[in-house]
Amino acid sequence: MATLSGGATRKSKFALSGTVCRILAGCTVAVFLISLLFGFDYHRVATYELRWTTGDVAGFDSYGPNVDKNGNRKILVLLPGDQPRCYMISYSNDLLTYLSKQNRATIPLVLRLNYSFGKIYSFEVVRIAGYGEGANTFTQSAHSGGGNCMDHLAR
């Protein structure tokens, strides 16, 4: 406000009312708190019971050869959901022997799920329950079909 002669005051055309300022401040604080809650990267560890198969009996064409140059057979661990068909690949006869001895169609895998803004953007294998550390066991992930494989892990 500007003071005029005689003590009268005039409002500036750029001044905001107190109510508008409080509303803007409240909205700013709310946006800041929501970004703190969902905006930063975080992770959680979860165990999934996932189906496994070998490349030659998978029933679909998977990425890469069914046997590597060292004679290790390809193992596919299928992520949840049917389409897109998402899977991790390992070439390890030791892992195949372990899985065959378990005589189960599924394997418990401990995954570290990495989040940003409330959505999974990547994952890492922490371990195969009962087998030990699994981080270096799976050499790659792949999928056939369209869509996002991470969406199935969020369920």
Image (spheres, rainbow, N blue to C red):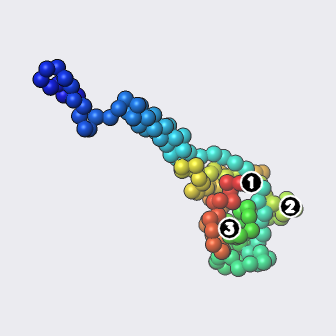
Residue reaching furthest to the right: 103
Pointer 2 with pointer 3, Cβ within 8 A? no
Q: Nearer the viewer, residue 34 or 94?
A: 34
* Residue at horizontal 86 percent and vertical 61 percent from the top: 104
| Residue to which mark 3 is pinned | 86
Determine the secondary structure under disc 3: strand
Earlier along the polypeptide chain: callout 2 or callout 3?
A: 3
Residue 75 locus on image (x, y percent)? 73, 69
**Residue 31 seen:** yes
Q: Nearer the viewer, mark 2 or mark 1?
A: 1
Earlier along the polypeptide chain: callout 3 or callout 1?
A: 1
Judged left or right of residue 133, residue 106 is right
Q: Nearer the viewer, mark 2 or mark 3?
A: 3
Determine the secondary structure under disc 1: strand
Residue 36 vs 110, above or below: the answer is above
Q: Nearer the viewer, residue 12 or 50?
A: 12
Specify few, some or many for label 3: CA neighbours under 10 Å numbering under 14, 14-19, or 20 or more: many
Q: CA distance from mark 3 to mark 1?
A: 14 Å
Q: Amino acid at mark 2?
A: Arg
Q: Nearer the viewer, residue 88 or 38?
A: 38
| Residue to which mark 1 is pinned | 48
Residue 146 locus on image (x, y percent)? 63, 72
Residue 27 locus on image (x, y percent)? 45, 38
Earlier along the polypeptide chain: callout 2 or callout 1?
A: 1
Residue 104's disc is: 2
Judged left or right of residue 11, residue 155 is right
Q: Amino acid at mark 1?
A: Tyr
